[in-house]
Amino acid sequence: MNLEEGLNNLKSALMNAQGTPFSNKKKVDAEMMMEIVDELIMSTPEEIQTAKEIEKDRQSILDDARRQADQIVKDAQARAKELISEEEIVKQAHEYANAEAQRANAEAEKIISNAKAQDMAIRKAMVEKLNISLGEAHNVLSKCVADVTATHEALEKIAGPNSNASVIPAAKGPKITPPIKDDK
């Protein structure tokens, strides 16, 4: 029996079934109906069976595709979070590096400023010390020149005014003047 014959037999059995009084319902032989349905199932063409298998495979493929798509989305979300996390780490590292660079620059400026101040203090102290030392040297040299001049004059007095005695002439050279004192 083919599908069309089986469906016609089923229709015929339903139409020829005995009706129940006062209703649209009919009594059918359940055993006979089951036989017709079984024959229909057995006679289902191979294409329908293939179509059923294809439908089953299609559903399986769709389910796999959904699972894979869900996994791809989860992986993409995880990677996006990871990239955002890496970007945040890089951002924080840049911020930290900039802050450290600013701190180092400020400290370097402070060190340079202190070094300049110390340099000025050292120079000032050195100039003052040299001024004192040169002043003391000037005083010593002035005293020596005064002693030499006094000795020279004493020799001239001893030798007399008309004497041809060999007397050391007065030293000719630059006049030593005391340094200018800065009273700051």
Image: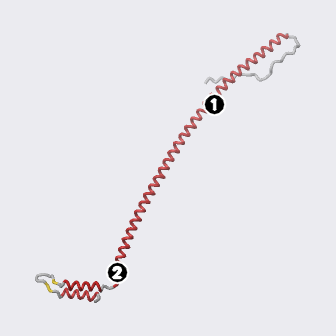
Is residue 109 toward the left or the right of residue 160 in the image? left
Disc 2 packing (10 Å; few <14; some 14–19; many ≥20): few
Q: Is residue 134 above or below residue 26?
A: above
Of the pair 153 and 95, the residue shown nearer to us = 95
Classify mark 2: helix, strand or loop.
Answer: helix
Is residue 52 toward the left or the right of residue 104 in the image? left
- Residue lying at the far right in this picture: please name it: 164
Contact, mark 1 vs mark 2 (Cβ under 8 Å): no
Is residue 142 toward the left or the right of residue 159 in the image? left
Give the percent coordinates (x, y) of residue 28.
17, 84
Is residue 17 toward the left or the right of residue 133 in the image? left
Task: Identify the mark nearer the N-term, 1 or 2.
Answer: 2
- Residue lying at the far left in this picture: please name it: 22
Question: Which quarter of the rendering shows the C terminus?
Answer: top right
Residue beneath disc 1 = 123
Of the pair 49 and 15, the residue shown nearer to us = 49
What residue type is disc 2 on? Ala
Question: Which quarter of the rendering shows the N terminus?
Answer: bottom left
Query: Picture quarter containing residue 155?
Result: top right
Residue beneath disc 2 = 51
Residue at mark 1 to residue at mark 2: CA–CA distance: 104 Å
